[in-house]
Image (cartoon, grey):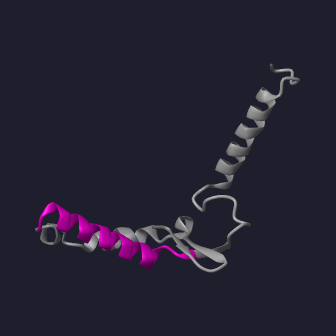
Amino acid sequence: MGREETSSKVIRFDYSKMDLNGIKEELRSCNWDEEMKGNVNESWALFKRRLLDLQHKYVPRARVQGEKWRKEIWLTHEAVKTIKRKYKVYRKYRDSKHQLV
């Protein structure tokens, strides 16, 4: 879920551009008491199917090149900067010649 393979490009869902209000509105408009009258497995299958349909309807897909794409779509710029800083600090820690050790 969230990733579809093609020959040379990867298509991923771009959750940063999803229509969250549209999803909420459709979920509110459902009569859940009527739809969830079956057993647990049937109810789960129905709920999962509905969520996947909403995902395909309201979450746009982004086509990205395989090797050029280094991060997941859900990672923000600030999170990437923090991860890079973490690796940089760890490399300094591992370097025996660095003044912090």
Q: From this viewpoint, which residue is outermost toward the right?
A: 97
Most extreme residue toward the front is 7
Q: How many marks?
A: 0
Task: Say which quadrant the N terminus sits in.
Answer: bottom left
Quarter of the image where one finds residue 52: bottom left
In the depicted structure, whether residue 87 falls above or below residue 61: above
Q: Quadrant of residue 73?
A: bottom right
Q: Can residue 41 be found in the magenta stretch?
A: yes
- Residue 20 pos. (x, y %): 44, 67
In percent of width and height, residue 42 lies at 18, 68
Residue 59 horizontal side relative to residue 80, left or right: left
Q: Nearer the viewer, residue 13 or 77?
A: 13
Q: Front-most of 40 and 82?
A: 40
Q: Which residues are magenta?
A: 38-61
For the point 35% across and 69% down, the residue is 51
Q: Which image quadrant for residue 39?
A: bottom left
On-image quarter of the C terminus: top right
In reply to whether residue 11 is colored magenta, the answer given is: no
Q: Looking at the image, which residue is at 50% across and 70% down?
A: 18
In the image, 66 versus 79, the foreground residue is: 66
Q: Position of residue 59 (x, y in %)?
A: 48, 73
SS majority, magenta: helix
Query: Which residue does the image show at 66% across and 73% down from the upper left?
Result: 64
Residue 11 at x, y percent in the picture: 58, 75
In the displayed structure image, the side of residue 64 where residue 46 appears, left or right: left
